[in-house]
Image (spheres, rainbow, N blue to C red):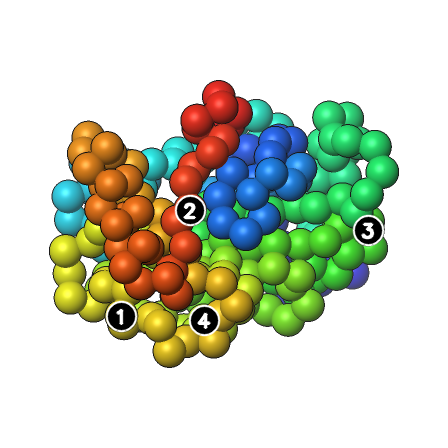
Amino acid sequence: MGGEGTRMKTYSVKEAYVTLQGEGAQTGRAAVFLRFAGCNLWSGLERDRASAVCNFCDTDFVGTDGTNGGKFIGPGALADHVAKVWHHDGPQGGAPYVICTGGEPLLQLDTPAITALKAKGFEIGVETNGTQVAPPDLDWICVSPKANAPLKQTSGHELKLVYPQTQPEAQPTCFESLQFEHFFLQPKDDTAQAENIAATAAYCMKYPKWRLSLQTHKLIGLP
């Protein structure tokens, strides 16, 4: 059989590896980090950074040449690959966990992929910029909103805001009424990191709705 309706989707993955979640409420949990290639807020090329909607990203999500990266035709092939990565390097026992990240994972992650991963026994988390509506049946939704980007996913398990940002529409008070269980501020990782950490900690102490999220994987030398 042929035709447009029978073509299987190709998923482009930058990298996939087992590590510990380093940020937010799931800090310390072993997971496959499944990094999808591509983003809708920055091309990933340094020449475009200054004009990007999100110009402080610290992640390489361009191409499919990272560890265990590649192109996978169909949701079954993607799920098989994630399961192989988990069973090769992952811990024994417990529910296997995959964190879909990017770039922007919801440009690619869809219901068939979620169904295939669930069939392999995975709990599924997503780290998204919130510009795409998340498909159903995800176990954990972390939204990290960006200034000047439309926020379409306004509920979930945690909202993680990079701090500080100068734009008025990217201040913590803009997001406090949204439907999230946890609210985190994460210090911006740039040349002023020490000052950013101090400013973030001070804000969380003054406004305890917000909790401090550090990138602990970087502090202990994990990817």
Residue 24 sits above or below residue 67 on the image: below
Residue 213, labelled with which disc?
2
Residue ID for mark 4: 153
Residue type indicated by callout 2: Ser
Q: CA distance from mark 1 to mark 3?
A: 38 Å
Residue ID for mark 1: 173
Q: CA distance from mark 2 to mark 3?
A: 28 Å
Mark with earlier residue (2, 1): 1
Mark with earlier residue (2, 3): 3
Mark with earlier residue (2, 4): 4
At a point 71% along the width and 40% down the height, the residue shown is 82
Q: CA distance from mark 2 to mark 4?
A: 21 Å
> The residue tagged with tag 3: helix, strand or loop?
loop
Q: CA distance from mark 2 to mark 1?
A: 17 Å
Mark with earlier residue (4, 1): 4
Q: Residues within 10 Å of mark 4 (few under 14, many from 20)?
A: many
Question: Looking at the image, which residue sits at the far front?
Answer: 205
Q: Could you say where residue 13 lies in the image, as x and y percent from the top left?
A: 55, 40
Residue 121, labelled with which disc?
3
At a point 15% along the width and 66% down the height, the residue shown is 168
Residue type indicated by callout 4: Gln
Q: Residues within 10 Å of mark 2 (few under 14, many from 20)?
A: many
Q: Could you say where residue 79 lies in the image, as x and y percent from the top left?
A: 73, 46
Q: CA distance from mark 4 to mark 3?
A: 26 Å
Q: Does residue 71 appear anywhere in the picture?
A: no
